[in-house]
Image: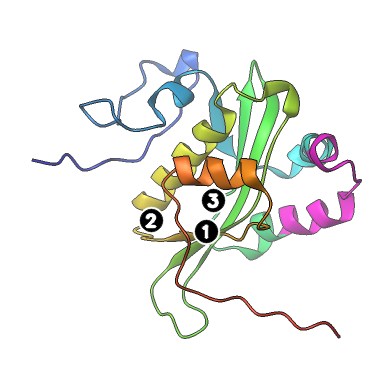
Amino acid sequence: MTQSKQPFIPQRADEGPEADYSYADGQDFDVQARENMFVRSMREDDLRAIVSIDKKITGRERTAYFERKIAETQDESAVRVSLVAEIDGYPVGFIMARVDFGEFGHTEPEAVMDTIGVNPDFAHHEVGHAMMAQLLGNLRSLQVEKVRTTVQWNSFGLIGFLDHCGFAPAQRLAFTRKL
C-alpha cells in the first residue's frame, strides 16, 4: 500500500517537536535536506539577501528584477508559494514560484517555478532540495498537480538537480521570435 505524502510544515526549535511527513520507507529525496534548515515563505525584507545570492551566481546586479518579482509574490498573487531557506537565521537560498489557475488552454491549476538560487557558499548543503521539498509539499496541499519551469539547454547542473527532484522534459514546445 502506498502512503500518501503530506505537506511539510517547518517549525523552529522553540515551536515544539516537528512532525515527520516523509515516506515511511525513507525513499524521498527531501528527508535529510529539510532536517538541516528552516524554509519559510518569502517576505519583502528578503530583497537584499536574494539580490546578493543572485549576484554571487550570475555576476549581475538585478535589484529591479527582484523588486518586481517580490512585489508580484507579495501583492499580486492570491497564493504565495515563494520560499526562502535559512541556516542559522541567515537566508541561503530562494525559490520564486506562482500558481496559475489555467493558461494556454489548460484549465487545471499549475505551478510555475521561475527563479531559484542557492548561495554558492552553501552549495552541497541540500539547500535546493529542502526548498524544493517545501515547495512541492505546499503545492500538494493546494491540490496543484503539476509544476513547470524552463531551463537553458546548457544549464547542466540545474537540469541534473531538477531531474533528481523528479522533473522531466514536458510535452510542450516553446517558441520565441526576435523583434
Q: Report the magenta residues as a range.
A: 54-71
Q: Secondary structure at mark 1?
A: loop
Q: Quadrant of residue 128?
A: top right
Left of 23 or right of it: where is 175? Answer: right
Do the numbered discs 3 and 2 sit on residues whose CB atoms are within 8 Å?
yes
Residue found 50% across the figure and 20% down from its top = 12
Tell me the residue that label 2 is attached to.
Answer: 142
Residue 135 locus on image (x, y percent): 48, 45
Residue 146: within the magenta?
no
Q: From mark 2 to mark 1, how far is it between C-alphas?
A: 9 Å
Tell me the residue that label 3 is attached to.
Answer: 81
Tell me the kind of residue under disc 3: Val
Do the numbered discs 1 and 3 sit on residues whose CB atoms are within 8 Å?
yes
Quick one: label 2, few (<14), some, or many (20+) residues within 10 Å? some
Q: Quadrant of residue 120?
A: top right
Residues 90 and 29: in front is: 29
Residue 130 locus on image (x, y percent): 50, 31
Residues 23 and 89: in front is: 23
Residue found 45% across the figure and 56% down from its top = 168
Tell me the residue that label 1 is attached to.
Answer: 79
Q: Secondary structure at mark 3?
A: loop
Quick one: label 3, few (<14), some, or many (20+) residues within 10 Å? many
Picture quarter with the C terminus: bottom right
Left of 80 or right of it: where is 89? Answer: right
Quick one: label 1, few (<14), some, or many (20+) residues within 10 Å? some
Do the numbered discs 2 and 1 sit on residues whose CB atoms are within 8 Å?
yes
Residue 24 locus on image (x, y percent): 20, 27
Say if 84 sits above or below 71 in the image: above
Left of 25 or right of it: where is 68? Answer: right
Name the chief secondary structure element in magenta: helix
The first of marks 3 and 2 along the sequence is 3
